[in-house]
Structures are given as C-alpha cells and as structure tokens.
Image (cartoon, rainbow, N blue to C red):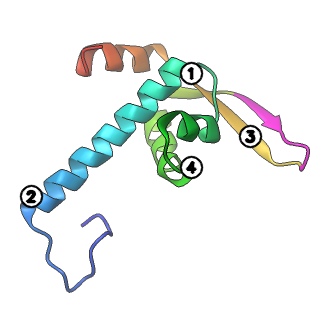
Amino acid sequence: MFGLFKKTEAASHEEIKHLHQRRVVTRYKVLQAINELGECNYREIADHLGIIDGSVTPRIPQLKEKGLIRITSVKKTPGGVAKRYYNITRKGRRELNGRYGL
C-alpha cells in the first residue's frame, strides 16, 4: 500500500495501521522541530531530529500544502545551489496546540 512491501507480500491491517501512524508522527515531529528552531532548512531539521535528510524531504511539501509551514527565504550556497528555509505558520502553531495538545 505504501510502497514498502513487495507486490507478492500481503501486509496485514495492523502493519498498514502502524506505518500510517509512523508517518503522522514523523510529520508532527518535523512540524514541532520547525516550531522549535524557527527559520530552518531540511538539514537543520534532520540534524535536530537525529534523522537523515531523506526522511524530512517528503514531509516538507505535505506540511506546506496544508498551510502549516511556509518558505521564508531562499539562499544560494557558494556552489550555486538554492537552499530553502522554512518557518511555521499561525495555522501550524494552532495545529500543534490543538491537535497535539502542546
């Protein structure tokens, strides 16, 4: 279902439920990290959470699409690569305070 299982391998309902819960927790952790760090990029979020950048990468567009975070600036590295910096929105803070009771 989530692309983590081979096509021939059947995933139980409990396995799928667990994977879904992990995804939600990861989105929550990324949102919480951005709230704690303020303006930050993928690498800073990953370092803060102790995870690899690749775990953060798919979560950013999801949070941005929901209006929970926004791009605050784009800075070029000396190599010419654009680094996007993100910050939490008011809606994102309300989501943390309401849904997760923080």
Question: Disc 3 and disc 4: Cα gap in Å?
Answer: 13 Å
Residue picked out by circle 4: 53
Instruction: Identify the mark nearer the N-term, 1 or 2.
Output: 2
| 10 Å crowding of disc 1: few (<14), some (14-19), many (20+) | some
Residue picked out by circle 1: 37
| 10 Å crowding of disc 3: few (<14), some (14-19), many (20+) | some
7 horizontally vs 94: left or right: left
Question: Disc 4 and disc 1: Cα gap in Å?
Answer: 16 Å
For the point 31% across and 69% down, which residue is it?
A: 4
The local secondary structure at tag 3 comes to strand
Residue picked out by circle 2: 14
Question: Disc 4 and disc 2: Cα gap in Å?
Answer: 28 Å
Task: Where is residue 32? Give x, y as percent.
Answer: 42, 25
Mark 3 or 4: the one toward you:
4
- Hey, what amino acid is under mark 4? Asp
Instruction: Identify the mark nearer the N-term, 1 or 3.
Output: 1
- Hey, what amino acid is under mark 1? Leu
Quadrant (top left, top right, bottom left, bottom right) of the N terminus:
bottom left
Residue picked out by circle 3: 83
Task: Using the image as rendered, state which of residue 13 and residue 68 is in the foreground.
Answer: 13
Task: Where is residue 85? Give x, y as percent.
Answer: 67, 31
- Hey, what amino acid is under mark 2? Glu
The local secondary structure at tag 1 comes to helix
